[in-house]
Image (cartoon, rainbow, N blue to C red):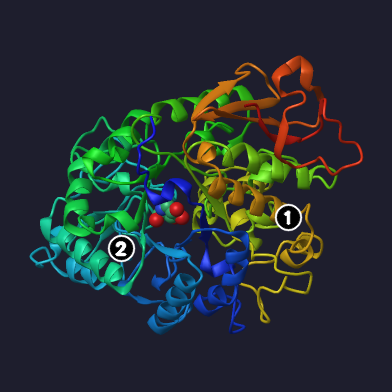
Amino acid sequence: MTSPNPAWWTSAVVYQVYPRSFADSDGDGIGDLPGVRSKLDHLADLGVDVLWLSPVYRSPQDDNGYDISDYRDIDPAFGTLADFDGLLADAHARGIKIVMDLVVNHTSDEHPWFVESRSSTVSPKRDWYWWRDTREGPAGPEPTDWESYFSGPTWEHDPTTDQWYLHLFSRKQPDLNWENPEVRAAVHEMMGWWLDRGVDGFRMDVINMISKDVGPDDALRDGTDGFLFGPRLHEFLAEMHREVFAGRDADLITVGEMPGVTVEQARLVTDPARAELDMVFQFEHVGLDHDGDKWHARPLRLTDLKASFGRWQAGLADVGWNSLYWDNHDQPRAVSRFGDDSPAHRRDAATCLATLLHGHRGTPYVYQGEELGMANSTWGSIRDFRDIETLNHFAEATAAGADPDDVLATLRPASRDNARTPVQWDDTEHAGFTTGTPWIAVNPDHVEWNAAAQRDDPHSVLAHHRSLIALRHASRTVQLGDFEMLLPDHEDVYAYTRSLDGETLLVVCNVSGTPYALAELLPEAVGAELVLGNREHLPDHDDAVLGPWDARVLRLT
Ligand code: NOJ
């Protein structure tokens, strides 16, 4: 069903900037806000509508800014509030909105709220975080047996008061206690402060973890029952909407990061009638190549991807809205992971994956460098990595007796650092990212794969993204059309239609290096008008054959 007045973000494309790795203006090796500002024309040229800025707040940088010590200031590594205001003004002048990362499941342990909270059991802010006594449980003295996302227990003993505090992520990221109305009011006020400054919305970090049932419960193991979609989540989101967004939400965009979210839960959260969030990031498709956990991969089966995306498209067809992504700062590069980054296929695989994704119903997210076909990097020893999750996992696994080389072999394709190598602007020494020494090594392939080389090439990965974004802007069928999955059992070819008001578009993508005769798969595609393709300029192109990593958007009616 199509509403007569769809929200503006149903035709929008969002671009994510991870500022640390985007562009460095002052030569300290760390990307910063003036760097982002200097590259706004790249975003305008791409045609994106929204820039989501990963955290730039003041932070000890234990988790690259997802550990915030002051929500109302910019970290000196990234610049100043004046730099932020300048960026916002310049982005708005180009018609680009800015979305802030909202990290309020936890703060830094250096945030004054936590410093106060840990000072004594009778501190007025004691109850702003989760404090518990020692419990002699089956797995140790921790208050519950939960395991942190960054290895080890979720509890840290604090000698000052001989109690433990909860941290679902690193020990420098204590979890806020959202049961306390003062915490919620402080968060709402801070959000209003940023909206008053002119920002256009929020991407909400692990927002489905804010309501918790923190034991005591000896039966809990991985703990997710206790903190994913806790009992008061909908209530907290609806309250936030009332307190922060009501009356101003038509121009804003809100997207909640929700590990473990189901289609049914997402439908509730994004049902406009319930006034919670506009859309969520789900994780199902980026778990399909995990064999048990993220450190152990298995090849993606395309039929699994179809079943998953198909369910999400159907589940949010009448009510709610999808966000669409392959890459972000936590995921290895899609072209390496789900595509083929060998020289023969990299351009076609990157453009094929992009076409597959952007044709769906939902709001597409492009992660910095994805529009250039950036790939996973080459990693030598553990010293090349910077990410806390990666380093903690290596330390824990090797301490438990695993062979370091075996652990390294699992980290290389899976580490979040694959997403965090600097953006490749040109072929110079540090890819034009910095004049200094980059905080993490530039991918050596930047000599070939970079923005300067692609900007004026009509067949580049960059040009293809420009075309996909322009198509979304131009086509109501791409924005709002009904979705139907075709060939659900085919292991290599991903195909679907989008239909609206008598127009039907067919998206057909060969997610493999094996050619297929189109007439045998989809006879209706033969002779149909090509709206957008990625290989029609190549000498081996044949209308009747779907070449390796061939992707086409065809008009059937
Ligand atoms: C999810 C973020 O995307 C990730 O980068 C971060 O480490 C955790 N949340 C903790 O904030």
- Nearest the viewer among 46 and 3 is 3
Q: Is disc 1's CB within 8 Å of ligand 1?
A: no
Which quadrant, please, contains the N terminus? Answer: top left
Quarter of the view holding residue 105 = bottom left
In the drawing, what numbered circle is on residue 327? Answer: none
- As rendered, which of 313 and 205 lies closer to the eye? 313
Above or below, 307 against 88 in this view is: above
Residue closest to the far right: 539
Q: Is residue 540 above or below residue 117?
A: above
Q: Is residue 382 visible?
A: yes
Residue ID at (13%, 58%): 127
- Does residue 507 lie above or below 198 as drawn? above
Report helix, strand or loop for mark 2.
loop
At which x and y percent is residue 74? 39, 77
Residue sitting at x 13%, y 55% = 180
Q: Is residue 301 visible?
A: no
- Report the front residue among 442 and 371: 371
Residue at 70 percent across and 45 percent down: it is 350
Q: Quadrant of residue 46?
A: bottom right
The answer to whether mark 1 and mark 2 are in CB contact below 8 A is no
User: Could you tell me which quadrant the C terminus lies in?
Assistant: top right
Q: Position of residue 490 (x, y in %)?
A: 67, 18
Q: Position of residue 307 (x, y in %)?
A: 53, 23
Ligand 1: quadrant of the figure? bottom left
Residue located beneath label 1 in the image: 378
Q: Position of residue 207 (x, y in %)?
A: 32, 49
Is residue 263 toward the left or the right of residue 105 in the image?
Answer: right
Position of 81 compared to 240: left or right? right
Q: Which amino acid lies under the numbered mark 1 shown in the image of this protein?
A: Thr
Badge 1 element: loop
Q: List the residue tagged with mark 2.
A: 107
In this picture, residue 449 sits left or right of residue 360: right
